[in-house]
Image: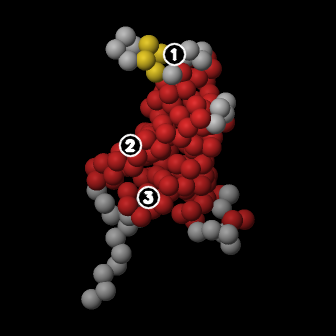
Amino acid sequence: MPKNLIRNSIDFFYPPFKKLMPLQTFRYAACGGANTLLDIFAFFISYNFIFQKRVLNLGFIAFEPYIAAFITAFCISFPVGFFLMRNIVFTQSTLHSRVQLFRYFLLVLVCILLNYVGLKFFVEKINLYPTVAKILTTIIVVSFSYLTQKNYTFKAEEAKVG
């Protein structure tokens, strides 16, 4: 089963980090890091090769190439991210999968807004190269996302004291 292979592969590298962080945090860093690299890679490929740094005009709306690349990367990283967070990182959550998916979707909507605002700000106001802007925006969004996932999306119920 792929989730067991992924979990066992990540856990294999955990022992040197055992004193630095809990296993769940290590798994989050590994899964989130891999998904973030996938997202940035998909963004880079989309921006440079699929959209070729040109505006994507759909007739009724036009997207700057970095926004089109962001949307493309998102379509790849969203399902991969949910799978990893639900099945590898936050496995002790007692919430139903549909509740997790709904909450994850809400979180992702907020992250999309943060990504959009971050990209627009860094590219148009600070004049950074779009891939660098994406990396900086990602750092901000990942920090917010971890805290939200841990405390809301995949929250494990606390044991009730009688």
Q: Is residue 61 left or right of residue 26?
A: left
Residue most extreme to the right? 16
Q: Quadrant of the C terminus?
A: bottom left
At 34% across and 14% down in the image, what residue appears? 60
Real-space Cα separation, disc 2 to disc 1, in angstroms = 23 Å
Query: What residue would you read off at disc 1?
Result: 55
The colour scheme of the drawn protein is secondary structure
- Sooner in the amino-acid sequence: mark 1 or mark 3: 1
Looking at this view, is 8 or 94 the one in front?
Answer: 94
Looking at this view, is 8 or 80 the one in front?
Answer: 80
Residue 39 visible in image: no
Real-space Cα separation, disc 2 to disc 3, in angstroms = 13 Å
Name above or below for residue 81 compared with residue 161: above
Query: What residue would you read off at disc 2?
Result: 109
- Which amino acid, mark 3? Thr
Name above or below for residue 158 compared with residue 51: below
At 34% across and 78% down in the image, what residue appears? 159
Location of residue 104 in the rendering, given as x and y in whole percent from the top left corner? 37, 49
Question: Do the residues under discs 1 and 3 have CB atoms within 8 angstroms?
Answer: no
- Sooner in the amino-acid sequence: mark 2 or mark 3: 2
At 43% across and 57% down in the image, what residue appears? 149
Location of residue 30 in the rendering, given as x and y in whole percent from the top left corner? 60, 52
